[in-house]
């Protein structure tokens, strides 16, 4: 009875197994982790650690600006006079008590200078936040493009290995026919081994690039493939460039902040004024009276000269940074625009070179099989084809880098719109 039940089950299992192996459509395909698209990564900029840090620093600067507007806290004092003396003042029976409230006034523009300096620092922090955002976008674009380039180089290395093995088989056939020397077969096998090592190296570089992309995208595990291409995407037209780059705007905001800190230090040298209002009680007559007082410091010994000199020095340093940043931004924009135009021409030339190298290899392959072209000539055309394909990848990486440099200066994401 048990045997009669087991046999149908075994038959069904064998039938399912046969169907899975016979039909590729029914077989289970391995899951490949494809990287998010470049647009998806750009949409996640605000969630990346560098952006979160910049936002936190901006929030801290805004909080300090809000705190700068707060008035100083008053103080409460309780005094007893004429206690434990002689005669009628022995003990505290006839002591005079005073309860007073003291309030710093912050006259001579001290509070306004502090508030303006804190507000200026918050504005500079806001510009730095935007600058970090586009720096992160540039990093994302570069890592994405490098991962795609590494994947392409691995594919090219695998294709080069296939071509080398194909040529090696042709050489081996000619050696068997006596049309080539045995040395040619040994050389061909050496080329195959070298091409196989190049594939292994390209595979390691690809995996490392995928790991960096997974890290910057905050993925749980490394990606295994690139979806939408960034290397083949043509950059947009450079902007007019009338507005100052973000780096220059940050330097200008820092100069304004440094100037307002000079004002803070200068007004800190002025006297501090405190007002007091109190109530005094006389024990011997049980009378009460108000007390009013003004207290101010005398800037006799400390006039904050060192602080003022330091603030002026910081202002000069900020002014020098602004001049340097303006010159660097101007030169960087000219260089980025020129590099972008040159990389476009280089990409087109590299694509034409690939087409010419493919045709040359095809013709040399036909000539080699017909016995009209030597193995050295075939090897030369194959090497030229491999080099031209790698040069096309290098040209596209150069174009991406030029677009990244220009986008960083214009304050936008690479291959995207301006802010």
Image (cartoon, helix red, strand yellow):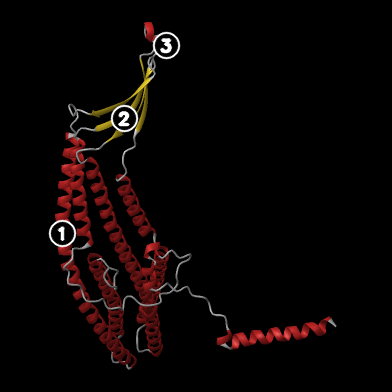
Residue under numbered circle 3: 91
| Quarter of the image that includes the C terminus | bottom left
- Disc 2 and disc 1 in contact, CB within 8 angstroms: no
Quarter of the image where one finds residue 392: bottom left
Residue under numbered circle 2: 277
Between the C-alphas of marks 2 and 1, the distance is: 55 Å
256 relative to 122 in the view: left or right? left
Instruction: Work out whether 352 lies above or below 44.
Output: below
Give the structural element (helix, strand or loop) at label 2: strand
Residue under numbered circle 1: 326
For residue 279, which numbered disc appears in the image? none
Residue 186 seen in this snapshot: no
Q: Position of residue 389 (x, y in %)?
A: 30, 79
Quarter of the image where one finds residue 373: bottom left
N-term mark: 2 or 1: 2
Q: Position of residue 5 (x, y in %)?
A: 80, 83
Quarter of the image where one finds residue 307: top left
Q: Nearer the viewer, residue 276 or 212?
A: 276
N-term mark: 1 or 3: 3
Q: Residues within 10 Å of mark 2 (few under 14, many from 20)?
A: some
| Quarter of the image that includes the N terminus | bottom right
């Amino acid at each position: 009875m048990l045997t009669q039940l087991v046999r149908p089950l075994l038959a069904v299992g064998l039938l399912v197994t046969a169907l899975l192996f016979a039909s590729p459509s029914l077989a289970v395909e391995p899951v490949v982790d494809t990287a998010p698209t470049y647009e998806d990564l750009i949409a996640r900029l605000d969630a990346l650690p560098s952006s979160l840090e910049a936002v936190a620093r901006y929030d801290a600067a805004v909080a300090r600006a809000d705190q700068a507007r707060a008035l100083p806290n008053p103080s409460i004092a309780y005094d007893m006079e004429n206690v434990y003396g002689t005669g009628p003042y022995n003990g505290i029976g006839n002591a005079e008590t005073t309860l007073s409230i003291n309030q710093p006034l912050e006259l001579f523009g001290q509070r306004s200078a502090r508030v303006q300096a804190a507000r200026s620092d918050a504005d500079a922090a806001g510009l730095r936040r935007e600058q970090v955002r586009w720096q992160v976008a540039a990093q994302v674009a570069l890592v994405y493009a490098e991962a795609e380039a590494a994947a392409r180089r691995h594919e090219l290395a695998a294709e080069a290995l296939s071509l080398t093995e194909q040529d090696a088989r042709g050489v081996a056939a000619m050696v068997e026919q006596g049309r080539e020397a045995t040395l040619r077969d040994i050389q061909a096998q050496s080329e195959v081994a070298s091409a196989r090592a190049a594939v292994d190296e390209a595979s390691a570089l690809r995996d490392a690039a995928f790991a960096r992309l997974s890290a910057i995208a905050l993925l749980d595990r490394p990606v295994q493939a690139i979806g939408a291409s960034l290397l083949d995407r043509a950059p947009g037209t450079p902007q007019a460039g009338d507005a100052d780059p973000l780096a220059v705007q940050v330097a200008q905001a820092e100069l304004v902040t440094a100037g307002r800190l000079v004002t803070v230090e200068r007004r800190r040298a002025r006297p501090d004024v405190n007002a007091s209002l109190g109530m005094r009680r006389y024990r011997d007559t049980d009378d009460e009276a108000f007390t009013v007082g003004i207290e101010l410091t005398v800037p006799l010994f400390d006039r904050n000269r060192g602080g003022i000199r330091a603030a002026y020095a910081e202002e000069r340093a900020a002014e020098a940074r602004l001049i340097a940043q303006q010159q660097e931004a101007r030169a960087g924009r000219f260089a980025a625009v020129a590099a972008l135009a040159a990389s476009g021409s280089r990409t087109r030339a590299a694509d034409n070179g690939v087409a010419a190298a493919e045709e040359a290899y095809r013709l040399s392959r036909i000539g080699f099989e017909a016995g009209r072209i030597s193995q050295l000539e075939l090897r030369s055309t194959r090497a030229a084809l491999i080099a031209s394909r790698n040069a096309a990848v290098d040209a596209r990486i150069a174009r991406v880098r030029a677009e990244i440099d220009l986008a960083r200066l214009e304050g936008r994401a690479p291959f995207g719109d301006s802010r």
